Structures are given as C-alpha cells and as structure tokens.
C-alpha cells in the first residue's frame, strides 16, 4: 500500500501534469464562455417546460396556443403604434425588410419579441410534430449514409441486413411517444453538439493526453532517472511493474474525474437543463443531421450517465494500451510520441481499407473512433449498424489489452533491464 501511494504521489509532484490539468480546465471554461450567448434562451425554454410540461399533448398545445395568441396581440399593438403595421406571426415580423427592429424598438421590447418568437417556434413545431417525425425514414437515412461514405459490396449488404432492427426501434419510438417531448432544440441551440461533441470530446482528449503522460511517466520513472537497477533489485523487485500500473490507473481515473466534474458542474451551471433530466433523448427536438434516435429508451440523464460510464472504460483501455507500450519503450516522451502515431494510424486505417469490405465497418470498432465520435454514442447510425457497437468495442479491446498487460507483466519478470 505504501508503494502504491508513493507511486501515486509522483504524478502529483510533476509540474507538467499539474500544469496541463490547469490548462485543460481553463480551456473547458473558455468553451462554455464562448457559447454562453444561448443561456438566456435556454432559460426561457426551461420556463416553457415548467409552465406547459415536457410531454406534448392536446392540453399542452391548447395552453401554448392561448399564450401565443395573447402575446402576438401585444406585439401587434406595439407594431401598429410604431410602424402602423400588424403581423400574423413573428416570422413575418422578422422577415419584413422595410425596417430594422433595433431602430424602432427599445431593448426591453426586442427581448419580448425574441421570447415570443421562441414560443412561436416551439408551438408550431410541436403542433406539427407527429407529421414531421412520421416523415422520417430510418432506411432512407441509412441509405444516404451508405452513399455519403461510399460503402458498397459486402459492407453495404451487412448494413442493409440490419434494416429490420432500425425500423423496429423507430416504431418503438413512435408507439411510446419518446419523440413527443419539449427539449432544447438542436436546430436552434445545437446543445447536443455543444455538450457531447465540443465539451465531452474535449474532456476525453484532454484526459487521454494526461492518461498517456501519467502512465508512461509512472512506469518509466526509474528508467528516466537512471535508478532502475536499484528499484528493481529491492524486495518488491519486478513486481513493482504491477504496482506502477495500478497507480497509473488510479491517477488517470482521478484526473478524469476532476476534469469531468469541474467541466460538467460549470456547464450545467450556465446552461440549465433542470426541466429536462427525465425527457427521452430521442425526442424530436434533439434530432440532428447525423442522428435522430438512440438505440434504447434513454432519458437525458440516463444517456449522460451511460456516456460517462463509457468514458471511464475508455480511460482504462488507454491506460492498458500505454502500459504495454511503456513495457518495451523505456522513455516517457518516446512512449507519448509513439502513442500519438498509433492513434493516428488507427484513425487513418479507415481510409486504407476498401469500402466494399466488411473490414471497413469492423475498423470502426476501436477506442479511437469512440473518442472522436462521442456525440453519437448509443445512437442509430448505419456505419455502426448494431445497437451493441459501444459494448462490443469496449469488451473486445479490453480482452485483447488484458492479455497484453498480463503478458507484459510476466515477461518483465524475466527480461534484461539493461
């Protein structure tokens, strides 16, 4: 236990690791600040959900209609007074090119107009929601993705063999009305991309950098300092390698927890989701160009939790991967450089494999692909073609890396240290 604590302490005495931790946290704050202009409108959407409820039904639409018509009456009173004009909708008002609103109305009135325009968007979108969602064709989306990626041959046929599951999940979303809920609109705010592509992806890459540096630093510490003959001739001896791996794993999980916790607390402090924690992630308002439903009926909170669990598992995988490299490369900085090259090779591998081959699709089953596509985890996509894509990727790579780590630990006991 004392050895483990001593190894852990090494990382927190490294100015590079602590400096990077501070830089990464500051960068995440900047990402939040850069997008904070949407926070007031998100607050207004929360007020809509609090007033009308999140489930879209006839009662809710009636309430929204009454409020919308009353608000439009106020708008027309003001525009008639100032412009001698009235409008059927806020869309018509903002489309009028004969004047510039800021030249004729004060800031308070402009904010009121903005709030009414937001209510109008949610009201009319909700009013035609059922028709809009039923016009979505999961098979057509999959075929479009096949065309965009240039997939053909056996690879395309494998995707098409899963169309029954695509349709089955789509019918399930229709029947249980997952899509009929209010949520911050992806088309207006792009909050899913902000949270899961910008923030979450940044946190993953930052943690990945720290994971590689920490693991290489801890395992190769004695080789970097030239004290390896003394350290590995001690009573603990070659078993120290396993202690170092466990210490690196603990530190990496802890650093990821710090970055994630600080980032998420800051994010949800600025962008309020208080009314949407239990709204299905497959709601229509959250649909994007590359996804429109999850494979399972997740609430937003459940989806976020699943993503966090998957992120922790990725940190474990990358720790094991780096440990294997550090077993044979006895320089911390060289390990980091080789890992970056390996990361790039795995990513570039997709461009080498023929797109008619099933191997092209199997090439997506990598931790690298998961890190770079965090915004579509557990989402319906043609190229990943199975609901268990994330599970299969993590399990297969864990088994491979576990065998690699066990082999490294065993071989280290017999290797020549010089």
Image (spheres, helix red, strand yellow):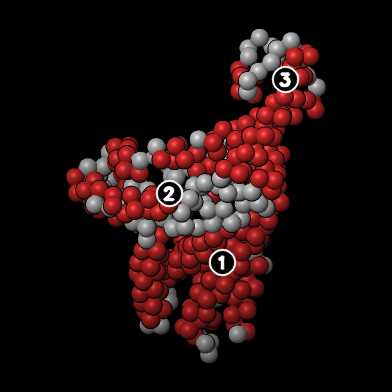
Distance from Cα at disc 3 to Cα at disc 1? 59 Å
Give the residue at x 48% y 84%: 239
Element under label 2?
helix
Identify whether 57 is placed above or below 123.
below
Where is residue 339, by image quadrant? bottom left
Element marked by disc 3: helix
Q: Residue 252 has which mark?
A: 1
Of residues 262 and 282, the one nearer the viewer is 282
Residue at position x 70%, y 40% in the image: 44
Q: Give left or right: position of 331 versus 150.
A: right
Q: Which residue is mark 3?
A: 76
Image quadrant assignment for residue 393: bottom left
Q: Earlier in the sequence, mark 2 or mark 3?
A: 3
C-alpha span from label 2 to label 1 = 42 Å
Q: Quadrant of the N terminus?
A: bottom right
How many marks overall? 3
Contact between labelled residues 3 and 2, with CB atoms less than 8 Å apart = no
Q: Earlier in the sequence, mark 2 or mark 1?
A: 2
Task: Tell me residue 340's x, y (percent).
Answer: 45, 53
Q: Which mark is residue 174?
A: 2
C-beta proximity under 8 Å, tags 3 and 1:
no
The answer to whether residue 210 is visible is no
Q: Residue furthest left?
A: 153
């Amino acid at each position: 236990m004392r050895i483990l604590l001593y190894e852990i302490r090494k990382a927190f005495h490294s100015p590079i690791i602590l400096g990077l931790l501070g830089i990464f946290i500051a960068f995440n704050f900047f990402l939040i600040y850069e997008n904070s202009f949407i926070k007031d409108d998100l607050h207004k959407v929360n007020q809509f959900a609090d007033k009308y409820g999140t489930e879209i039904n006839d009662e809710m639409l009636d309430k929204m209609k009454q409020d919308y018509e009353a608000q439009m009456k106020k708008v027309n009173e003001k525009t008639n007074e100032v412009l001698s004009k009235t409008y059927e909708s806020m869309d018509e008002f903002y489309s009028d090119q004969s004047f510039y609103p800021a030249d004729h109305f004060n800031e308070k009135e402009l904010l009121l107009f903005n709030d009414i325009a937001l209510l109008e968007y949610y009201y009319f979108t909700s009013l035609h929601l059922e028709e809009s969602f039923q016009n979505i064709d999961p098979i057509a989306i999959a075929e479009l993705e096949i065309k965009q990626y240039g997939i053909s041959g056996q690879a395309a046929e494998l995707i098409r063999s899963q169309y029954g599951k695509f349709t089955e999940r789509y019918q399930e979303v229709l029947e249980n009305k997952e899509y009929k809920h209010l949520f911050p609109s992806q088309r207006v705010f792009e909050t899913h991309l902000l949270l899961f592509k910008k923030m979450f992806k940044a946190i993953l890459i930052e943690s990945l950098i720290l994971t590689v540096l920490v693991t290489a630093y801890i395992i190769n510490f004695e080789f970097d300092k030239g004290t390896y003959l003394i350290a590995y001739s001690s009573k603990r001896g070659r078993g120290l390698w396993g202690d170092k791996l466990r210490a690196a794993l603990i530190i990496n999980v802890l650093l990821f927890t710090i970055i994630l916790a600080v980032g998420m607390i800051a994010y949800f402090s600025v962008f309020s989701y208080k009314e949407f924690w239990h709204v299905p992630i497959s709601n229509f308002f959250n649909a994007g160009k590359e996804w429109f439903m999850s494979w399972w009926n997740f609430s937003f909170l459940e989806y976020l939790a699943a993503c966090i669990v998957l992120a922790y598992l990725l940190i474990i995988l990358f720790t094991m991967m780096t440990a294997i490299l550090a077993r044979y490369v006895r320089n911390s900085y060289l390990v980091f450089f080789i890992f970056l090259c390996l990361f790039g090779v795995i990513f570039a591998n997709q461009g080498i494999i023929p797109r008619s081959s099933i191997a092209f699709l199997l090439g997506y089953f990598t931790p690298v692909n998961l890190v770079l596509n965090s915004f579509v985890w557990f989402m319906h996509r043609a190229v990943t073609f199975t609901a268990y894509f994330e599970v299969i990727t993590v399990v297969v790579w864990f088994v491979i890396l576990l065998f690699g780590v066990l082999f490294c630990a065993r071989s280290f006991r017999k290797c020549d240290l010089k």
